[in-house]
Amino acid sequence: MLELQVLLSADRLQHWLVALLINGALIAAAQRLPLLTPAGWVHAGVLGTLLLGSLGWPGWWAVVLYLALGSLVTRLGFRRKQEQGLAEARGGRRGPENVWGSAATGAALALLCVLPSAPMLLLQFGFAASFAAKLADTCGSEIGKRWGRHTLLITTLRPVPPGTEGAISAEGTLASLVGSALMALVMLELGLLQGFSGWLLVSVVGLAATLLESLIGAGLQQRCQWLSNELVNALQTLIAALLAMLLASQLGLA
C-alpha cells in the first residue's frame, strides 16, 4: 500500500511539472500578444498551470477562450471609449490584479476537483458560472459604455453618465446576457457542463450575478474605498459560483 501511495504521489508530481512546463512555454510564446502586461502574463502562467493540473485541457481552454473573448469585447469601439475617457487603462491590457479578480474563484474550485471524492459536477457548475458571470460583466460594461443610449443607476433608475459604478443600460444588459450565454456554451462544448438545462442555468446565473455586481458597485463600493474593482469582480464570481452550485443541487442537475 505504501509503495502504491508513493507511486501515485510521483505520478501526480510529474503531472503538475508537465503542466508547469507546458504553460511556461506557451506564456513565453504569447508575450507579444497585446492582452496582458508582462506581470499579467506571469500570473496567467500560474493560473494556467493550476487549471491544466486540476481540470486538464478543458479547464485550461475555458479560461484561454474567456480571455480571448473578453479582450475582443474590450477592443470594440476602443478609440471612441478613449476619447470619452472610458477605456480600460494600459490599452486594455490586463495585469495580475485583473487575472485573479476574474479567476480566483474558478481556480479555487478547480483545485478542489483534485480532492478524493470531490463533487465534480457541482464544482464544475460553480467553475462555469464564475467565468460566465465575468464575461457577462465585461460584455455589459464595454458595450454599455460605448453604445448604451440611456444609462441608469441600478439603485435609483436615475440617469447617470456611462461608466458610472452601478450603471446599467438596455444595450449593456442584453450584451451581458449574450456574454453569459456564450461563455456557458463554451463550457458546454468543452464538457464542463452537461445538457441544455446546465447551459441555461449557468447563462441565467451569469446575468443575475452581473446585476448583483452593479448593485454592489452602486451601493457598497461607493461607501467603501478599500473595495476595488478587482475585489468586486472576485465577489461577483464567488456569488455566481455559489448560486449556480446551490441551484444545480436543488434542481438535481449535479
Image (tube, helix red, strand yellow):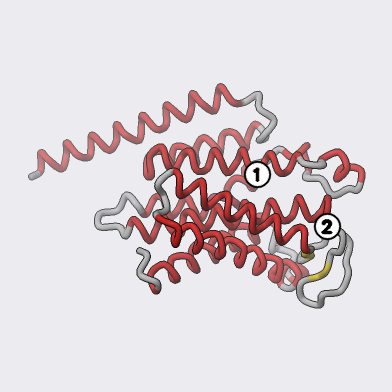
Marking on residue 148: 2
Q: Position of residue 220 (x, y in %)?
A: 71, 72
Q: Which quarter of the picture shows residue 159? A: bottom right
Quadrant housing the N terminus:
top left
Q: Nearer the viewer, mark 1 or mark 2?
A: 2
Q: In the rendered view, would you say 9 is above or below 147?
A: above
Q: Which quarter of the picture shows residue 91? A: top right
10 Å neighbourhood of mark 2: few (<14), some, or many (≥20)?
some
Quadrant housing the C terminus:
bottom left
Q: Nearer the viewer, residue 124 or 32?
A: 124
Say left or right for 203 vs 9.
right
The residue located at (37%, 54%) in the rendering is 112
10 Å neighbourhood of mark 1: few (<14), some, or many (≥20)?
many
CA distance for labels 1 and 2: 18 Å
Residue extending farthest to the bottom is 156
Q: Position of residue 231 (x, y in %)?
A: 63, 59
Say left or right for 101 vs 218.
left
Question: Hey, what amino acid is under mark 1?
Answer: Gly
Q: Which quarter of the picture shows residue 223? A: bottom right
Residue named by callout 1:
70
Q: Secondary structure at mark 2?
A: loop
Marking on residue 183: none
The residue located at (43%, 43%) in the rendering is 190
Say left or right for 53 vs 141.
left
Q: Secondary structure at mark 1?
A: helix
Between discs 1 and 2, the one toward the N terminus: 1
Residue extending farthest to the left is 1
Question: Hey, what amino acid is under mark 2?
Answer: Gly
Q: Nearer the viewer, residue 188 or 231?
A: 188
Q: Position of residue 84 (x, y in %)?
A: 91, 48
